[in-house]
Amino acid sequence: MPSAKHVLSTLNHDRDAAELLYVYPVVSRRAGGVSIGINLNPNNACNWRCVYCQVPNLISGNGPPIDLSRLEDELRLMLSDVVHGDFMTERVPADARRLNDVAFSGNGESTTSPQFAEAVAIARRLMSEFGLLRTDTKCVLITNGSMLGKPIVQGAVAELKRANGEVWFKLDAADRSNLGRINSVRLAPEAHLERLRKAAELCPTWVQTCVFARGGEPPTERHLAAYLDGLRSVIHSGAPLLGVLLYGLARQSHQPEADELAALDPHELDRIANRIRELGLTVRVHA
């Protein structure tokens, strides 16, 4: 019988629960069930540093070379336990006992891994082996989108589509100032929006946006107006966005700014969601 700390919940994302290097299970509030995560960044390296990031000891960098054979063995083991074993009954609350997805979502940006494309191929092959491509179980890439301009990543995202794929593309801001303030990156908003358009052309794509109070204040009207203008430009380009996954802070940040951040009042979160819906987009809200 697993210990209490290894019973998963939306608040307990213990990535050591499965005692594996690359594969970990979580109960995801955004997914609404069990997500089998694939962590291609066990070195805790990311090319962005979002102020709300919950990865401890985050460093700047890319994903390291990975052991593809070990990744395949771990994913096969986890899928076997979830699909055919007693994982769900022993580890998961009764109301979340459904396998929603296999998700590339680790301790950094998955697409910086030099073997990202090979890892996607492994995920697709094993999902087929376990009969999951005939179900509504998805293969999800949760990404900051920074590498979507690279042909090798675009090819992997196209492969992802053939595995019931979805891209969840981070867009927390669409102006230089707030991209720097929230995601700690210096980039042209237009270039990032172009990568979002490309993702949507290659694979069904949700925008994922984190909103929060900082220094006791919600996002400013200027921040929100630039964000909405960015979304509007992508919509007008004809990119087939699925909608927006709008979420707040559920767990403590491990970044230096943590004490400045707080969850938004639910009414403020709903107000922002309604502003996005005015663009004609579906919005799923996760407080």
Image (tube, rainbow, N blue to C red):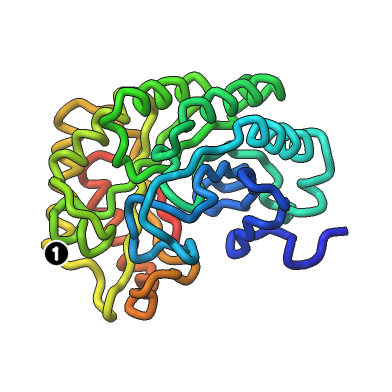
Question: Which residue: 33% across, 74% down?
Answer: 257
Picture layout, residue 24 above or below residue 130: below
Q: Is residue 210 found left or right of 142 in the rendered image?
A: left
Q: Quadrant of residue 217?
A: bottom left
Label count reads 1
Q: Which residue is mark 1?
A: 221
SS class, disc 1: helix
Residue situated in front as seen by the camera: 153 or 177: 153
Question: Which residue: 76% across, 54% down?
Answer: 91
Image quarter of the C terminus: bottom left
Residue situated in front as seen by the camera: 241 or 21: 21
Question: Which residue: 48% across, 55% down?
Answer: 44
Q: Quadrant of residue 285?
A: bottom left
- Tell me residue 115's x, y (percent): 48, 31
Picture layout, residue 228 above or below residue 103: below
Q: Amino acid at mark 1?
A: Glu
Image quarter of the N terminus: bottom right
- Tell me residue 240's x, y (percent): 29, 28
- Tell me residue 197's x, y (percent): 24, 31
Label 1 crowd (10 A; few <14 / some 14-19 / many >=20): few
Question: Which residue: 74% across, 61% down?
Answer: 6
In this view of the protein, can residue 244 be seen by the observer? no
In this view of the protein, can residue 103 be seen by the observer? yes
